Amino acid sequence: MSDSPIRHPAFRRLVAGASVSSLGSGVAPVALAFAVLDLGGDATDLGIVVGLYALADVAAVVFGGVLGDRLPRTVMMVGSSALAAVSQGVAAASLIGGWSSLPLLAAVGVVNGALGALGNPSSSAITPQTVPAALLARAIAWRRIGQNLGVVVGAGLAGLLVAWAGSGWALALDAASFAWAAACFARIHVPALPATVRTGLLGEVAAGFREVMRHTWLWVLIGQAMLYHLFYGGAQGVLGPIVVGRELGRPAWGYALSAMMVGFVVGGLLCTRWRPARPLYVGTWFLGLTAAFPLAMAWSDQLPVVLAGAFVHGFGLEVFSVGWDLSIQENVAPEKLSRVYSFDMIGSFIARPVGLALTGPVAAGVGFHAWLAVVGLVLAASVLAAVTVPDVRRLQRRDSEHAYA
């Protein structure tokens, strides 16, 4: 029997913990939204609670990258998951017990945002330590499939849990998912990384930044990701529910998001078998398919067209994401990997809140359909610009150990 990532115990435990944690993460936004409303809050209050979470996430992620390269990554993953289980458990208990408040939920959001930022760079960077180098591409694909399925199941359960048991019990499931993840991560045993040179927090952050800037393909595509989140974040989070809900009915928006998640899973399954020689270049072309969803919403009022656009968006984004993770993990020195991932996360998500805030006013001025078309064209143009970069075109996959250079 040929070797498989699943045959390696460390990888199985990583996938089990990450997938169950993703299930809880699929439940949490729905539970939190209804918890805020049940406490008398409105859309502004919910925006504040969610915004504080995002702000804490961005503020702490650099520290997560430095600590993930200083300490054993399992320590960061276990610690952040265990503490998140406690903090989310407090929020759940407060709702179930009837003593919750909006400030308490906001404070828990800040804590959980910071904890996620501290643990996520280590979680992303540890995959190469759990499997032989030749299995890394398939390991990345299978891990992403598990996490995407977790989100799908969690999102599907969320509404039922809130309706049947209440927001508090739904958040209790999220707390339990963090505890499960911590237990799985605690059983991961991987070889230690080379010791890093301690130059102080700012020095180590600067070293991570220099590593990003050393690879042209890396900083170019982080910049492209900023454009993606700046434009597409508002298209999905603000305009999509309005346009699709108004023209096709509110259930249609749920169907569209489900179709996108199916695209993620199908794209991941393809990547478990397909091994292009230039995964970053090929993946970047597939990233151009993300333009299909906003363009479908802009130009069609037919449900099959919107669903097809959503599916193609998820499919293309997943093929790119696997090639992106593989390229980072094969070409960045292991002792700098967490810091590089922290800059990737900052670059990817710092623009999203800005896009969410600006989309409504801008789209109101130019028209919702016109702005969705602009979003689709910007996504396509940014991909066409990225594939002209020589380093993006030439980067080859590497299957040997010590592949970073």
Image (cartoon, rainbow, N blue to C red):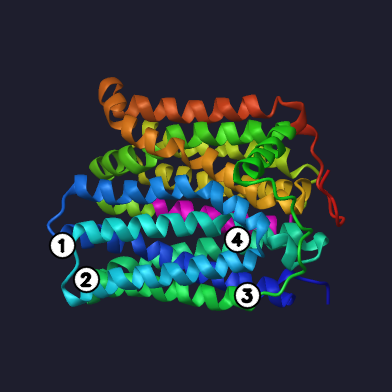
Q: x, y (%) of residue 7?
A: 74, 76
Is residue 389 or residue 57 the one in the foreground? 57
- Residue 72 is left or right of residue 147, and the answer is right
Q: Can residue 319 be seen in this view?
A: no
The residue mark sitting in front, 1 or 2, is: 2
Q: Which of marks 4 and 3 is nearer the N terminus?
A: 3
For marks 1 and 3, the one nearer the N-term is 3
Instruction: Tell me the residue that label 2 is attached to.
Output: 95
**Label 3 Cα crowd, 10 Å radius (few <14 / some 14-19 / many 20+):** many
Tell me which segment is drawn in magenta: 256-274
Disc 1 secondary structure class: helix
Marks 1/2: CA–CA distance: 10 Å
Which residue is the site of mark 4?
123
Give residue 13's mark: 3
Which residue corresponds to the image point at 57% horizontal and 66% vertical from the top-left? 77
Q: Position of residue 102 (x, y in %)?
A: 20, 57
Q: Mark 1 points at which residue?
A: 38
- Number of the front mark, 1 or 4: 4
Q: What residue type is labelled 3?
A: Arg
